[in-house]
Amino acid sequence: MTRSFSGSVRAALFGGAIARMLGRFLLASVLTGTVSLTACDSLRPAVSLWVRPHDKTPADASVSIDEEFVGLLGYVASRGVRLPEGEHRITIEREGYFPWDMMVISDREPISLDVRLVPIPD
């Protein structure tokens, strides 16, 4: 069964990460501020990603997956993220710290990452 949903929504709101997070929906078309979504019967396989920050790692560091902002580290650490199967680059950055970057392959098992941002020396 396929259903269509249309609405006048700014296309910018449905950038890559948000469109992927819709899970059940396939972005069908984006036309000058109007987004059409089509529901799919099958869900994409995904795994849980959990991030455990080191005690001195700032909770307000930015978390990006595949170069798209996901949220602040404190939020992502407390709630986790669902990753579609495949290879993904996880990047955590904050001003005054060296960036933390890792490639992960999501398959079937949950992924848990220990993150420690190292301050840049003065």
Image (cartoon, helix red, strand yellow):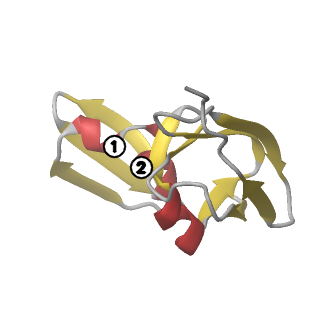
Measured as percent of width and height from the top left, residue 103 is found at 78, 37
Measured as percent of width and height from the top left, residue 89 is found at 69, 36
Q: Please tell me how crowded label 2 is: few (under 14), some (14-19), or many (20+) other residues with Cα within 10 Å.
A: some
Q: Residue at x 60, y 30 (%)?
A: 120
Q: Residue at x 77, y 57 (%)?
A: 113
Q: Amino acid at mark 2?
A: Ile
Looking at this view, is 20 or 61 the one in front? Answer: 61
Q: Amino acid at mark 1?
A: Phe
In the rendered structure, find residue 18 and report the number of the disc placed on it. Answer: 2
Measured as percent of width and height from the top left, residue 96 is found at 50, 34
Measured as percent of width and height from the top left, residue 27 is found at 42, 43
Q: Please tell me how crowded label 1 is: few (under 14), some (14-19), or many (20+) other residues with Cα within 10 Å.
A: some
- Name the image quarter holding the C terminus: top right
Apparent side of residue 52 relative to residue 65 in the rendered image (left or right): right
Residue, far left: 8
Residue tagged 1: 14
Q: Residue 1, can we see it? A: no
